[in-house]
């Protein structure tokens, strides 16, 4: 049983995270083209707004969505989210490299990716509450007791997700998310950081997976949302619906991508603008992902990064010491 001191430290940490800076996706890259992400701190003051493939959101503090809001529209694509007006062009089977501006080491947790078909209205006009998301990739606890977020950090705050090869062509919203677990030992302590992007997918596939509304992806009390990170866990139950489409995978970016060509994306509702074929060196590095992670849940284990992983803290065997070390991380 945790001591009074440990409980006190956990409570202090839960309060501290509400004012701590976190991160956001600064760009996504596919096929040699880089698309600017949303900087929520700056976007709130832009007039007119930039036309991006990334959805607008009002989390100017880089904050999170808490479990008590899982039934609200904010969990779909973050707080106050509004449709992106552009779309990134991608082929089924291609990898999308997602670059975060930063991510705190203390905010350990899974990385999860979803798609939702936008239908005839297109992604620039679709009602976000009508979107039905299906999970295409997930990674939770990986090798050596690390979490997917640790692998993302070790790869320079980058993550790769593969668009399923079997998916039908069309307009989709990519929902990329990290769930931070440092305060998840108590209810309403998990922190969700969803980020959304419009895609125009070229494909010969026919798969149209069933999905669920963004407001039904998680429950506030399910395993993986309530989770004690400081109990020396050996496994982690990734929350949300099960994977239900073949050909998708995700993992930490195996190497630093070549300098991409910047693109603004195609106008939604029309054919994507033609782009020249990228040089082979500019394409994302192809790497065969593992067939699953330690939880055998179908999520691809992150591929080995050429960037050396950060040294792992020495185990103390004491929850209070781990919590105090985390408190120092939060203050840095």
Image (cartoon, rainbow, N blue to C red):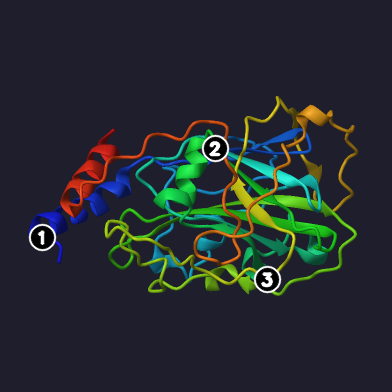
Q: Name the residue under label 1.
A: 3
Query: In the rendered view of the protein, which quadrant contains the N terminus?
Result: bottom left
Where is residue 19 drawn, in percent x and y? 31, 44
Q: Mark 3 points at which residue?
A: 244
Q: Would residue 146 be visible to someone looking at this image?
A: no
Q: What residue appears at the point 86 percent right and 45 percent down from the top-left corner?
A: 272
Q: How far apart are marks 1 and 3 (CA)?
A: 42 Å
Q: How far apart are marks 2 and 1 (CA)?
A: 41 Å
Q: Which of marks 1 and 3 is nearer the N terminus?
A: 1
Element class at badge 3? loop
Q: Would residue 307 be visible to someone looking at this image?
A: yes
Element class at badge 1? loop
Q: Mark 2 points at which residue?
A: 39
- Disc 2 crowd rating (10 Å Cα; few below 14, some 14-19, many 20+) is many
Query: In the rendered view of the protein, which quadrant contains the C terminus?
Result: top left
Q: What residue appears at the point 50 percent right and 43 percent down from the top-left corner?
A: 151
Where is residue 313 drawn, in percent x and y? 30, 40
- Disc 1 crowd rating (10 Å Cα; few below 14, some 14-19, many 20+) is few
């Amino acid at each position: 049983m945790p001591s009074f001191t440990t409980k006190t430290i956990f409570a202090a940490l839960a309060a501290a995270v509400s004012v701590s800076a976190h991160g956001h996706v600064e760009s996504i890259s596919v096929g040699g083209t880089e698309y600017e992400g949303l900087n929520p701190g700056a976007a709130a003051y832009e007039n007119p707004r930039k036309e991006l493939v990334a959805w607008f959101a009002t989390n100017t503090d880089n904050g999170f969505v808490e479990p008590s809001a899982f039934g609200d529209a904010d969990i779909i694509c973050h707080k106050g989210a509004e449709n992106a007006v552009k779309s990134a062009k991608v082929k089924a089977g291609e990898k999308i490299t997602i670059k975060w501006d930063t991510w705190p080491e203390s905010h350990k947790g899974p990385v999860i990716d979803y798609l939702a078909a936008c239908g005839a209205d297109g992604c620039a006009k679709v009602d976000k509450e009508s979107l039905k998301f299906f999970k295409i990739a997930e990674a939770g606890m990986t090798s050596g007791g690390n979490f997917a977020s640790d692998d993302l950090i070790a790869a320079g705050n980058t993550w790769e997700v593969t668009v399923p090869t079997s998916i039908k062509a069309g307009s989709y919203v990519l929902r990329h998310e990290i769930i931070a677990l440092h305060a998840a030992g108590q209810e309403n302590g998990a922190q969700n950081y969803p980020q959304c992007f419009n895609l125009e997918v070229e494909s010969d596939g026919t798969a149209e997976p069933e999905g669920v509304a963004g407001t039904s992806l998680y429950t506030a009390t399910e395993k993986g949302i309530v989770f004690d990170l400081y109990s020396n866990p050996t496994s982690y139950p990734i929350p949300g619906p099960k994977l239900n489409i073949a050909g998708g995978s995700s993992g930490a970016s195996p190497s630093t991508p070549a300098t991409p060509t910047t693109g603004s994306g195609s106008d939604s509702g029309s054919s994507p603008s033609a782009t020249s074929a990228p040089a082979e060196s500019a394409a994302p590095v192809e790497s065969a992902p593992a067939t699953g992670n330690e939880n055998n849940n179908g999520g691809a284990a992150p591929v080995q990064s050429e960037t050396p992983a950060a040294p792992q803290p020495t185990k103390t065997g004491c929850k209070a010491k781990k919590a105090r070390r985390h408190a120092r991380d939060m203050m840095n």
